Amino acid sequence: MLNIAQTVIDQYNGQLPADYEQLTSLKGVGPKCANLVLGIAAQKPAISVDSHVHRVVNRWGYIQTAQPEKTLSALEKLVPQDRWIDINRLLMPFGKFHCTHNLPKCSICPVLDYCRQVGVTRHR
């Protein structure tokens, strides 16, 4: 991270680039991180699919994908672009604290009526 920060200082006058290609050219910044920066820091439409987002949308049955990269592509086709930033803001913490990998909290889930619970064998 220190190297990334130093590169941003040296090459971009301390201003984090708001361009996908420039971000991913920074050593250590991949698609997930670049899209997160674009969506949250730059407020540009972008979806960052981490393990939480991937798990939640597949568990809901909204999409059926095996890899986060495929999840990103599917979400970009299904979700209106003006909602892309909301995906990260809402689903990352929801997946981390509520719809967890092991023993999701289905008994208190606010969207249980809409969830297919794909892959859930046990829950709290």
Image (tube, rainbow, N blue to C red):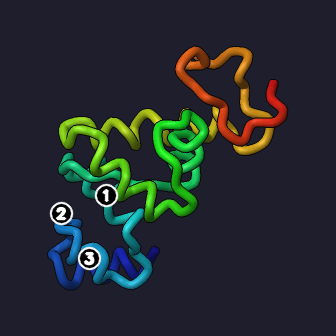
51 left or right of 79? right
Residue at (44, 64) in percent of width and height: 69
Label 3 crowd (10 A; few <14 / some 14-19 / many >=20)? some
Tag 1 and tag 3, C-beta contact below 8 Å:
no
Q: Which residue is mark 1?
A: 37
Residue at (43, 33) in percent of width and height: 90
Quadrant for residue 82, please give it.
top left
Task: Please say if 4 is above or below 60.
Answer: below
Q: Which residue is mark 3?
A: 8
Q: Which mark is residue 80?
A: none
Mark found first going from the N terminus, 1 or 3: 3
- Between marks 2 and 1, how big is the CA–CA gap? 8 Å
Q: Label 3 amino acid?
A: Val
- Between marks 1 and 3, how big is the CA–CA gap? 13 Å
Q: Which mark is residue 18?
A: 2
Task: Please say if 124 is above or below 34.
Answer: above
Q: Label 1 amino acid?
A: Val
What is the count of numbered marks?
3
Tag 2 and tag 1, C-beta contact below 8 Å:
yes
Quadrant for residue 4, please give it.
bottom left
Circle 2 SS class: loop
76 left or right of 70? left
Mark found first going from the N terminus, 3 or 2: 3
Q: Label 2 amino acid?
A: Ala
Residue at (73, 16) in percent of width and height: 107
- Between marks 3 and 2, how big is the CA–CA gap? 12 Å
